[in-house]
Image (cartoon, rainbow, N blue to C red):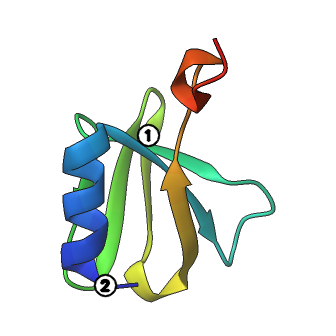
């Protein structure tokens, strides 16, 4: 995954969902608790810190919360 692309998408939307090779479920990244470095991503959680390789991200998408986010009001 490209660091600049991921960072700009996170800044544009405030949050992203990502698929990471090591995990069976997607992770939710927020602008306020995520640091995207050149080689790894650090996610501050309420009970610790999770780090994983930037290259292990296989996909990302904007996280929607409501029907209005999808244009389905």
The quadrant where residue 1 appears: bottom left
In depth, the one of 62 and 71 nearer the eye is: 71
Q: How many marks?
A: 2
Marking on residue 35: none
- Few, some or many C-alpha atoms within 10 Å of disc 2 (few <14, some 14-19, many ≥20)? few
- Residue at x 22% of width, y 63% of height: 7
Q: Position of residue 16 (x, y in %)?
A: 45, 48
Residue positioned most to the front: 72
Q: Which residue is mark 2?
A: 2
The quadrant where residue 44 appears: top left
Residue positioned most to the right: 24
Q: Position of residue 31 (x, y in %)?
A: 25, 40
Gap between marks 1 and 2 measured at Cα: 25 Å
At numbered mark 2, what does the secondary structure look like: helix, strand or loop?
A: loop
Q: Which residue is mark 1?
A: 48
- Residue at x 22% of width, y 46% of height: 12
Q: Please give left or right for residue 63 compared with residue 35 in the image.
A: right
- Residue at x 32% of width, y 76% of height: 40
Q: Please give left or right for residue 17 compared with residue 51 in the image.
A: right
User: Image height check: is 55 above or below 54?
Assistant: below
Q: Please give left or right for residue 23 compared with residue 11 in the image.
A: right
In depth, the one of 38 and 18 nearer the eye is: 18
Q: Position of residue 15 (x, y in %)?
A: 38, 40
Q: Position of residue 20 (x, y in %)?
A: 61, 70
């Amino acid at each position: 995954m490209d660091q600049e692309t991921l960072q700009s998408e996170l800044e544009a939307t405030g949050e992203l969902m990502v698929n990471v090779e090591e995990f069976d479920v997607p992770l939710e990244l927020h602008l306020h608790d995520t640091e995207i470095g050149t080689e790894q991503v650090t996610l501050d959680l309420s009970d610790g810190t999770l780090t994983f390789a930037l290259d292990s991200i296989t996909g990302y998408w904007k996280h929607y919360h409501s029907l209005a986010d999808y244009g389905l009001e």
